[in-house]
Image: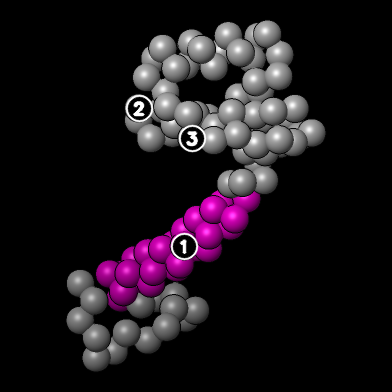
Amino acid sequence: MQHVLLKMPNGEIKIEDNSTHIGKKRVAKLCNEGAVSAGTIESDLRPNQLKCGISHGVIELYEAEYAKLWSLRRLLTNCKRGGRNTNAKSTQGYNIL
């Protein structure tokens, strides 16, 4: 199957199957809405499978950064409460607020 990568006016990249009549109509509709062709991919995978594979690394990075932020939030919350949680690292000598 041939897939077309379309860049939407808002910056989103859409992957559409261009090998069928319905897919070609979708591509034409999106182009009329302002989408610009960003390339093609020749693959036996379906568009959803391609999207999952492409975004897999980004999701892992997002989850790692989210975990760091959540740890920092717990630390700050514990400092505001007077450091009652013994699992929190000592903040003595640091002005964090």
- Few, some or many residues within 10 Å of mark 2 (<14, 14–19, 20+): few
Magenta span has 73? Answer: yes
Where residue 3 sits: x, y (%)? 65, 29
- Viewport quadrant of the N terminus: top right
Q: Amino acid at mark 3?
A: Ala
The residue indicated by pointer 3 is: 38
| Quadrant in which the C terminus is drawn | bottom left
Mark 1 or mark 2: name the one nearer the start of the chain.
2
The single residue placed furthest to the bottom in the displayed view is 93
Q: Secondary structure at mark 3?
A: strand
Q: Nearer the viewer, residue 27 or 46?
A: 27
Q: CA distance from mark 1 to mark 2?
A: 28 Å
Closer to the N terminus: mark 3 or mark 2? 2
Q: Is residue 36 magenta?
A: no
> What amino acid does circle 1 point to?
Glu
Label 3 close to label 2 by CB (< 8 Å) = no
Mark in the foreground, 3 or 2: 3
